[in-house]
Image (spheres, rainbow, N blue to C red):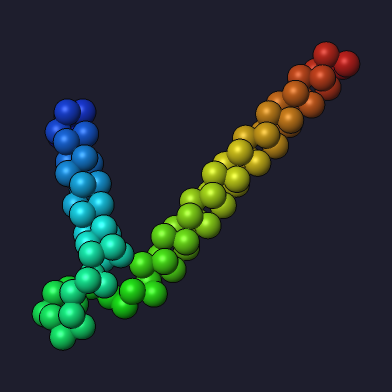
Amino acid sequence: MAVSDKALGGSMLLVAALVFVYYTTWAILLPFFDTSSPIHDYFPAREWAIRLPAFLLVVGLSGIGLFIGSTIMKEKAKKAQKARLRAA
């Protein structure tokens, strides 16, 4: 039913390593190959090597900011409710 922690961690590590190798090849090694090389067919345009990580960074930081903001608001509401209960 559930995947063990060891198997899940191993699969996550494998995916991270594959993404790292693909991105490194795309962003760093691809310019050294001739543009007529068939290896260029496996990768999108180089401009996306900057746009995609920048977009993911903005989305990730926005998600973290929203999470922190909602947590602060919830804690503030809890404190206000406790203060109301003490005052009543």
Question: Vertically, is 83 above or below 2?
Answer: above
Residue 19 shows up from this direction: no
Question: Vertically, is 64 above or below 39?
Answer: above
For the N terminus, the image quarter is top left
Viewer-side residue, 66 vs 21: 21
Q: Position of residue 36 (x, y in %)?
A: 16, 85
Outermost residue toward the front in this view:
32
Q: Position of residue 78 (x, y in %)?
A: 71, 26
Residue 86 shows up from this direction: yes
Q: Position of residue 47 (x, y in %)?
A: 39, 75
Left or right, residue 64 beside residue 18:
right
Question: Vertically, is 82 above or below 41?
Answer: above
Outermost residue toward the top in this view:
86
Left or right, residue 24 beside residue 59:
left
Outermost residue toward the right in this view:
87
Viewer-side residue, 30 vs 50: 30
Q: Position of residue 64 (x, y in %)?
A: 54, 44
Residue at left offset 61%, top offset 38%: 68
Outermost residue toward the bottom in this view:
36
The part of the image, by quadrant, that contains residue 21 is bottom left
Viewer-side residue, 46 vs 4: 46
Residue at left offset 33%, top offset 74%: 46
Residue at left offset 75%, top offset 23%: 79
Residue at left offset 68%, top offset 29%: 75
Left or right, residue 43 beside residue 72:
left
The part of the image, by quadrant, that contains residue 45 is bottom left
For the C terminus, the image quarter is top right
The part of the image, by quadrant, that contains residue 44 is bottom left
